[in-house]
């Protein structure tokens, strides 16, 4: 829902473009020289074509997970596990087609999730904890936060609401190579057709400036472009309409360009100190520098498209396709962490040394969430959740809980 390796992106883009054109072309042979009159020249043996170059392999499933004993899961006893039960059942609903999860999810459906001892015994007896480590074998990573914002807008364009919130455009093409390269199930390339070639889709700047090729239908209009920008980073939100009702929207697609942090850019330019580069600090900078704001926003080429969601959902939909749970859902990198799995997170509260040790559910992904020990903590809806999310950038460790025998089970591909 929410949220960068260029050479790999470029490689696959060229691979796809070649596939769209019918594969690699065979070079024409050089003209045969005229043979001398007395001695005919023998025909040279054909040169075999070079073997195709295989794409670089992404990390193997579970490559950054190491089985450990329960006593190696730091602070495991600190959490009240009955609090995770509704979120765990949500994951089970999203994993119903995964054979590796069917037994434990079936048992969970029949359990009393309000019994702390029973829930703890369930996890400790049915799951194997796996320590998550980075490719350099370190154990700590970054934990950030996100939330579901509320911004003001309208269903139609008005003098106040004049910034479009776009649905996914009809000419956006998503290329999935899973059937050819199953190991690439977490990679999808996006672009558009230009003649018979796939070319990159419009950037944020091109979309907002109107370059003549972008066509999409607005599903609503926002009053504030900065609030809209941050809603795109969150990947979901609610629009407060003039009559006081709310329109809930969620992630529909993305333009295929990598996410670039404008907070990091402001720090590099000397506009903000590192500790000031929170969502709140960036908004305050925008208010003080309105003439520089558009250029800053356009420095992030990534652009998120939305769809309308039912207002009756308990939370925004994550990449697993189930509603997120405030304080119990996280976004992860699915190349390393199986989507839907419980993840024990040991970190601290935003801008604080106070421990935050909690079993979470990996129910979402994000453009900026890259790496094994990397998580985005979902804080919930509204201003208070936004306050926590905006200032959260903590260090943390992670342990993934997988059903015993998980690695031996056939795994269905997760979709987004």
Image: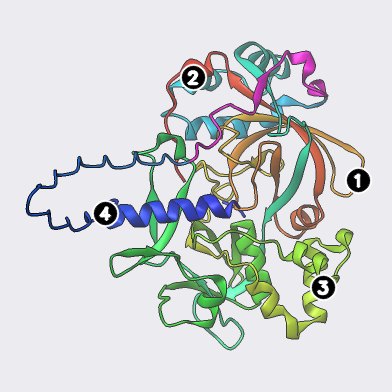
Look at mark 1 in the image and give the residue it sits on.
Answer: 352
Element on which disc 3 rests? helix
Please name which of the two marks, 1 or 2, marks the residue nearer to the observer. Answer: 1
Q: Residue at x 21, y 54 (%)?
A: 29
Residue 109 badge: none
- Extreme-bottom residue of the structure: 159
x and y, in percent, of residue 278 in the image: 80, 61
Rendered view: 303 above or below 355 = below
Residue 72: say if magenta.
Answer: yes
The magenta segment = 56-77
* Upstream in sequence: badge 4 or badge 2: 4
- Separation of marks 4 and 2 at Cα, in angstroms: 52 Å
Marks 3 and 1 sit apart, C-alpha to C-alpha, by 22 Å
Nearest-to-viewer mark from 3 and 2: 3
Which residue has dot 4 on it? 25
Mark 1 and 2 residues: CB-CB less than 8 Å, in contact? Answer: no
Closest to the observer, 267 or 242: 267
Q: Please name the residue that numbered disc 3 is placed on.
A: 284
To which quarter of the image does residue 345 belong? Answer: top right
Where does label 2 land, which residue? 106
Instruction: Give whichever of discs 1 and 2 has the lower sequence position.
Output: 2
Side of 3 where 176 appears, left or right: left
Residue at 73% across, 13% down: 69
């Amino acid at each position: 829902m929410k949220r960068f390796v260029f050479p790999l992106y470029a490689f696959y883009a060229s691979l796809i473009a070649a596939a769209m054109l019918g594969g690699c072309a065979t070079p024409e042979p050089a003209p045969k020289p005229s043979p001398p009159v007395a001695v005919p020249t023998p025909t040279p043996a054909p040169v075999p074509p070079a073997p195709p170059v295989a794409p670089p392999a992404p990390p193997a499933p579970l490559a950054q997970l190491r089985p450990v004993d329960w006593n190696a899961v730091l602070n495991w006893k600190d959490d009240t596990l009955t609090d995770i039960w509704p979120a765990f059942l949500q994951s089970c609903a999203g994993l119903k087609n995964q054979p590796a999860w069917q037994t434990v999810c079936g048992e969970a459906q029949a359990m009393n999730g309000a019994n702390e001892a029973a829930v703890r015994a369930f996890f400790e007896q049915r799951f194997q904890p796996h320590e998550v480590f980075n490719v350099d074998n370190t154990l700590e990573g970054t934990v950030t936060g996100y939330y579901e914002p509320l911004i003001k807008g309208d269903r139609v364009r008005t003098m106040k609401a004049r910034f479009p919130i776009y649905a996914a455009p009809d000419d956006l093409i998503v290329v999935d190579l899973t059937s050819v390269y199953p190991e690439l199930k977490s990679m999808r390339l996006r672009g558009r057709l230009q003649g018979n070639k796939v070319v990159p889709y419009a950037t944020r700047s091109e979309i907002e400036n109107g370059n003549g090729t972008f066509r999409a239908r607005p599903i609503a209009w926002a009053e504030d472009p900065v609030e809209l920008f941050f809603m795109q980073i969150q990947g979901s939100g609610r629009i407060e309409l003039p009559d006081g009702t709310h329109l809930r929207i969620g992630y529909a697609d993305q333009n295929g360009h990598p996410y670039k942090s404008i907070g990091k850019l402001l720090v590099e330019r000397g506009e903000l100190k590192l500790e000031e580069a929170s969502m709140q600090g960036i908004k305050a900078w925008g208010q003080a520098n309105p003439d520089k704001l558009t250029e800053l926003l356009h420095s992030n080429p990534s652009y998120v498209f939305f769809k309308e969601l039912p207002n009756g959902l308990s939370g925004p939909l994550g990449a697993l396709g189930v509603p997120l749970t405030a304080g119990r859902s996280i976004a992860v990198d699915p190349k390393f962490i199986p989507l839907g799995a419980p993840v024990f997170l040991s970190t601290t509260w935003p801008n604080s040394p106070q421990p935050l040790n909690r079993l979470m559910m990996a129910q979402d992904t994000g453009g900026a969430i890259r790496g094994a020990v990397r998580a985005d903590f979902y804080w919930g809806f509204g201003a208070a959740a936004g306050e926590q999310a905006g200032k959260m950038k903590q260090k943390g460790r992670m342990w993934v809980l997988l059903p015993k025998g998980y690695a031996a089970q056939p795994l269905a591909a997760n979709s987004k």
